[in-house]
Image: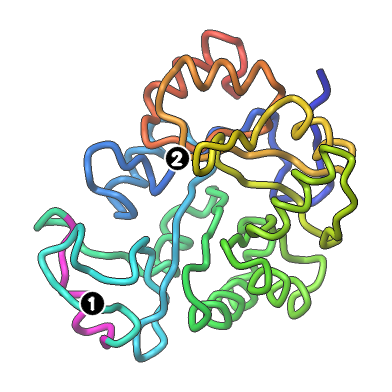
Amino acid sequence: MTHVRLRHPYLDHPTPLPFAHRGGAADGLENTATAFRRAAAAGYRYFETDVHATADGRLVAFHDATLDRVTDARGRIGELPWSAVGAARVAGSEPLPLFEELLEEFPHARWNVDVKAEPALFPLLDLIARTGAWDRVCVGSFSEGRVARAQRIAGPRLATSYGVRGVLGLRLRSFAIPAALRVGAVAAQVPEVQSGIRVVDRRFVETAHARGLQVHVWTVNESERMESLLDLGVDGIMTDRIDILRTVLERRGAWA
């Protein structure tokens, strides 16, 4: 079974890649410095996070558009200044980190960054350019248009994954149905199943590999599912349960 190794430095690591999803969100401290510190201590090098821009343009590592679900504050991040967002606490105790702070604290980590809203795109690209983090960040989004814009602006220095439209095109190609695909992406990052429809099977993986794309699957928290996906030849798994994924990979001799 062939795994794909692309030339972009972001992917310069033995596959399968283990991603700490939101730092390892199983205990509710998702996207906090504490979660990422724990993942780093567990040996993880690849972290998944999300970014939103505050009303005054600060780039926050946070999944939701609002603070309501996981913090002790309320309101839409895009409508609040950083002074208000920075005062919120995840699970009542942990501050929301700026993505720039995470890049600085974890200089050897590689980040898969889901750009959740359009206002976050230019601040993210500016940050990557300012810090020279081109080899350390892969930009993704549900919006294919958003990642395509990022790629046009940054060029081949930037690693990107497919959005929903790109994944759909790849799925159609796997059934030999013609579909346009963006050139330049390095990975298809997909759920195993979406709306009851299987996305990841051997045909999908082989089609991606034939185009030089890695396949990274989210969010997988059960060891049996991890094993099945690895048997299909996927190139990366994103998990909240960083302990389980490490155990599975160690058992297979695949923890690098």
Distance from label 2 to label 1 (Cα)? 24 Å
Determine the residue positioned at 30% across, 50% down.
Answer: 30
Residue furthest out toward the top: 251
Tag 1: residue type?
Answer: Val
Relative to 154, say whether 28 is above or below: above
Q: Is residue 90 above or below residue 187?
A: below
Left or right? Give the position of 19 relative to 181. left
Query: Which residue: 37% across, 71% down?
Result: 60
Tag 2: amino acid: Ala
| Residue at 41% over, 87% down | 57
Which one is nearer the viewer's eye here, 97 or 174? 174
Crowding near pointer 1: few (<14 within 10 Å), some, many (20+)?
Answer: many
Q: Are marks 2 and 1 in contact (CB under 8 Å)?
A: no
- Residue 53 percent location from the top left of the image: 41, 79
Residues in magenta, as a range: 80-90
Whole-percent x, y for residue 48 in the image:
48, 49
Q: Is 106 contained in the magenta span? A: no
> For mark 2, does the 10 Å Cα neighbourhood hold few (<14), some (14 to 19), or many (20 or more) residues?
many
Q: Position of residue 65 (x, y in %)?
A: 34, 71
Q: Quadrant of residue 71?
A: bottom left
Depth order, front residue of 218/16: 218
Which image quarter: residue 51?
Answer: bottom left
Q: Earlier in the sequence, mark 2 or mark 1?
A: 2
* In this picture, residue 44 sits left or right of residue 177: left
For disc 1, the marked residue is: 85
Residue at (63% x, 73% y) in the render: 146
